[in-house]
Structure formats: C-alpha cells, structure tokens
Image (spheres, rainbow, N blue to C red):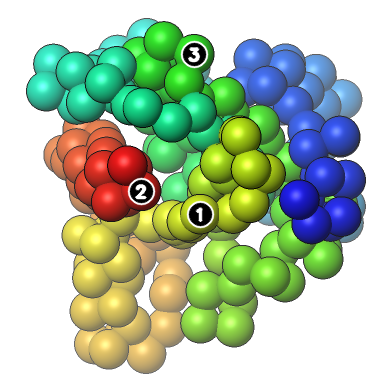
Amino acid sequence: MKTFIAQALFQSHSYLEYRKLMADLLKEGKSTAVEQTQERTHYSELNESRMRRLDKTMHITDENSAKLKSLTKRYIWLVLTESWCGDAAQILPILHKMEIESNGEIEMKLVLRDENETLMNHFLTNKSKAIPKLIVIDKETGSVVGDWGPRPQGAIKLIEDYKDEFGRIDETAKANLQLWYLHDKGMGTQNEIIQLLQNLE
C-alpha cells in the first residue's frame, strides 16, 4: 500500500463520524474547509439538509443489492470529500447505503480533500481536484484497483452542456445539477459503481 494512502486511511472517518463532524462544525458556523468562508458554510448547511433527507429516503435497488451481496472480494472505499461540496452531499449517502448492503465486503472511509493533498493529486479529474472521488482498494492486497467520480455520467453531461452554452458554471447550473440528482434518485451513481465492481470481480 502506498504511504500516502496508508496515511489517509489512518486519519479517515466512517460515514457516521463524518456526518457528526459536519454537524459539529456547523454548530460553530464552520465547514470542513481549511480556508473558512461564509459561502462554504452556507453550502455545508444546505448539504447537511440534503444528506439528512437522503439518509432517510435513499435506497439501493433489489438488483444492485443482490450484486453487492454476491461480491467475492473485499474492498476499502477511500473517498475524498468536503462538507461544502454539493456533489458529495448527493453521492455519499448512496455510497453509505451500498456499503451497508454489501454485508461487510465493503468498508468506506472518508477523508477531507484539503488535508490530503498528495492523495488528491494522484486522482485528479481533468487536472482539477474534483470531489467526491472514490478510490477502490483491494483489502487483501492493499492495492488501488479502480476509482470513480466526481459525478455520474448524466450529471457530467449536464454541466458540460451548460458550460458549452453559457461559458461558465453559475448558480443556475448548480441548481440544475441538484434537480438532476433529485430526478435521478441515485440510479446513475449506483449503476456506474456496480459496473466498476463487476469489472473488478
């Protein structure tokens, strides 16, 4: 196992620990950001509400649940995230439910992007530090066998099309993205990650 991955795992959080960290920081008017801003705290507040709702309503399809239960290998999911990230708020609850459905074959560990720069720099998306980023580690060998993120393909296309038309990502684009996640109901994320796992099996 690479040293920077081992270091990240050493300081990682379970999903429930991460949710508590978010809530505790918000009580102090803060986000997980190294550089605190009012905007990031505002987004963290929105994301807290989103995640609380998704924790209650998100479910894994019976078909995907069966595939998770039939995994023959054990994995660590190391996920780079931050509390202010809108994509992470939509995706982490899905990953957590998939972790539960796997009957212990998947163990998810969350780390903060800005505190793990070396790790992040090894998993850039188009040279940017886009999150969330899921790094799949074979538990037996400790080797990285795949990665996914920061968004499912449908969401990527929505943002790319918007940028092509308007030349930038603004609040309207962000609102459209959240609506896309709402209508998708987690299916894009579930199905893409299931496909990744099946390719590894």
Q: Does dot 1 land on a helix, a strand or a loop?
A: strand
Which label number is shown at residue 104? Answer: 3
First along the sequence among labels 2 and 3: 3
**Residue at (61%, 67%) from the top-left corner?**
123
Q: Is residue 32 left or right of residue 152?
A: right
Residue density around tag 1, few if under 14, some if 14–19, many if 20 or more, within 10 Å: some
**Residue at (50%, 28%) from the top-left corner?**
74
- In which quarter of the view is residue 82 placed? top right
Query: Marks 1 and 2: CB-CB under 8 Å?
Result: yes
Q: Residue 110 in the image: x percent, y percent?
A: 67, 35
Q: Quadrant of the C terminus?
A: top left
- The reply to whether residue 46 is visible in this rendering is no
Q: Which residue has dot 2 on it?
A: 200
Discs 2/3, front:
2
Q: Is residue 144 above or below residue 42?
A: below
The answer to which of 192 and 151 lies nearer the viewer is 192
**Residue at (60%, 34%) from the top-left corner?**
139
Which label number is shown at residue 145? Answer: 1
